[in-house]
Amino acid sequence: MKQMIMFLLACVSSSFLIAQTQEKDINKMAEFKNASYDFGKIQYGVAVEFDVEIKNISNETIVLENVTVGCGCTTPKYEKGKKIAPGETAKVTLGFDGKTVGPFTKFADLYFNDGMHKQVKFIGESRQ
């Protein structure tokens, strides 16, 4: 029983370390402009958007496989399966519907080949 618990603990620990390594890997392979974006104050109900620019700074092609968002108020626009060659730049446009009163913080997850991942966020405040 003790061996089984130790084995499970080792599996969980290695999964955590792999996830941390994946985050580091994408940051070594790409630069992200606007990965943390502040809309400031926006008018309630007015849709806004911004671009996250991804520049490949590695010697290998990276592939933008998917973008997921936390709620229906955030909409991503991107080319699924976009190959970003060394030195090239791609973009993901994130839109927000503005139908929230008060401060907001939203997240989007960008998934790349080889299990790499980058979380981006945006904040702001919607006023009537």
Image: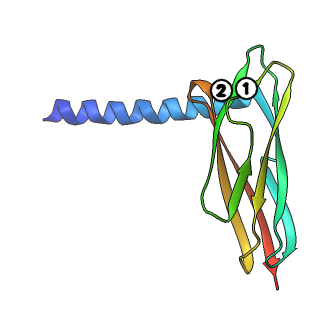
Q: Residue at x 61, y 31 (%)?
A: 116
> In the rendered structure, which amino acid carries the disc numbered 2?
Asp
In the image as oriented, which residue stretches furthest toward the top? Answer: 59
Q: Secondary structure at mark 1?
A: helix
Residue 83 lies in quadrant: top right
Q: Residues within 10 Å of mark 1 (few under 14, many from 20)?
A: few
Residue 9 lies left or right of residue 51; in this view the side is: left
Q: Position of residue 91 (x, y in %)?
A: 82, 39
Can residue 8 be seen at all in this image of the molecule? yes
- Whether 43 is drawn above or below 23: the answer is below
Can residue 33 be seen at all in this image of the molecule? no
Q: Secondary structure at mark 2?
A: helix
Of the pair 61 and 29, the residue shown nearer to us:
61
Residues at discs 1 and 2 in contact (Cβ within 8 Å): yes
Residue 95 lies left or right of residue 106; in this view the side is: right
Q: Position of residue 63 (x, y in %)?
A: 69, 26
Q: Residues within 10 Å of mark 2 (few under 14, many from 20)?
A: some
In the image as oriented, which residue stretches furthest toward the bottom? Answer: 128
Q: Which mark is residue 28?
A: 1
Q: Residue at x 81, y 67 (%)?
A: 47
- Whether 121 is drawn above or below 24: the answer is below
In the image as oriented, which residue stretches furthest toward the left? Answer: 1
Q: Residue at x 62, y 63 (%)?
A: 72
Q: Position of residue 49 (x, y in %)?
A: 83, 58
Of the pair 61 and 19, the residue shown nearer to us:
61
> In the rendered structure, which amino acid carries the disc numbered 1?
Lys
Q: Which residue is mark 2?
A: 25
Q: For the residues marked 1 and 2, what is the alpha-carbon distance in whole angstroms?
A: 5 Å
Q: How many marks?
A: 2
